[in-house]
Amino acid sequence: MIKVAASILSADFLKLGAEIDRAADAGADWLHFDVMDGMFVPNISFGPAVLQAAVRANRLPCDVHLMIESPERYIESFAKAGARVITVHAEATHHLHRALHQVRDCGCLAGVSLNPATPPDCLRYVLGDFDLALVMTVNPGFGGQKLIPAAMNKVGEIHRMLSEAGVSAEIEVDGGVDLTTAPKIVRQGATVLVAGSAMFGSPDIAAFVDGLKKLGRAAV
Ligand code: DX5
Ligand code: ZN
């Protein structure tokens, strides 16, 4: 089964509550929160207060993608605000293993994200320490970018690495996911698809989510 994570970065912030309801009614499984600090990525988005408001107002699990330097400084705040999954970037921390365990100790599922140019090998020595690998298929910082094909090929490599080690974890793909790019991503073993601009820009958001989920069923 494919899970669809709606990235609220592409929602209309003035109507955030209604936009979240729209994604939930359309069948999205998770809400994806892109947290940006203007340092790790060249953009600034929102923090724990916005997450807390969203958690109170809706029923979907919140998947927090921390695009911030030294994410360990904020893990507890986002956990307290109600995150279900907290993902840190391997490139943003000197102590990935420690950060992942900090996330789990806060009661959340731990994710590790890799920028497009980061090799998947860095996951090898933290296998078993994360619940989700987030493959960035665009350079993080903005919605609405074009998928980088070479980055997508890491999905299959990570899928093999996990199978060979007998470790189970979600493989989430983020950036440029739409109904054209998703089939190849799903065939390589992705289990969670993040969609921002393609979802919120779709004239029929329910049909879009259904289209992504059908790809998952076809790949089984
Ligand atoms: C980019 C973010 C993504 C972004 C995806 O830094 O991590 O989650 O919102 O947006 P689309 O689906 O438009 O590429
Ligand atoms: Zn993201």
Image: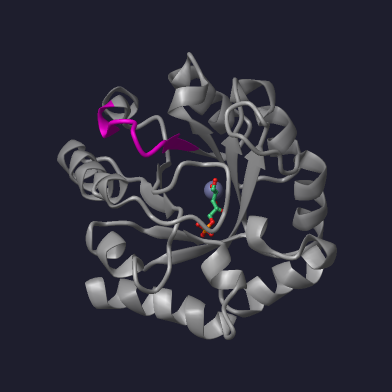
The residue lying furthest to the left in this view is 164
Q: Is residue 35 left or right of residue 55?
A: left
Residue 60 in the image: above or below residue 119: below
Q: Quadrant of the N terminus?
A: bottom left
Q: Quadrant of the C terminus?
A: bottom left
Q: Would you say residue 81 is visible in this rendering?
A: yes
Residue 119 located within the stretch drawn in magenta: yes
Residue 184: image location, x then y, percent? 25, 64
Q: Would you say residue 28 is visible in this rendering?
A: no
Residue at (63% x, 31% y) in the render:
106
Residue at (36% x, 45% y) in the render:
169
Residue 208 in the image: above or below residue 200: below
Give the magenta-colored segment's residue range: 111-121
Residue at (46% x, 81% y) in the render:
210
Q: Is residue 31 left or right of residue 194?
A: right
The image quadrant that residue 124 belongs to is: top left
Name the colouring of the figure.
one colour
Number of marks: 0
Residue 158: image location, x then y, percent? 25, 42
Q: Nearer the viewer, residue 22 or 55?
A: 22
Q: Nearer the viewer, residue 211 or 132?
A: 211
Residue 41 in the image: above or below residue 159: above
The image quadrant that residue 197 belongs to is: bottom right
Residue 82 in the image: above or below residue 186: above
Residue 205 located within the stretch drawn in magenta: no
Residue 103: image location, x then y, percent? 57, 31
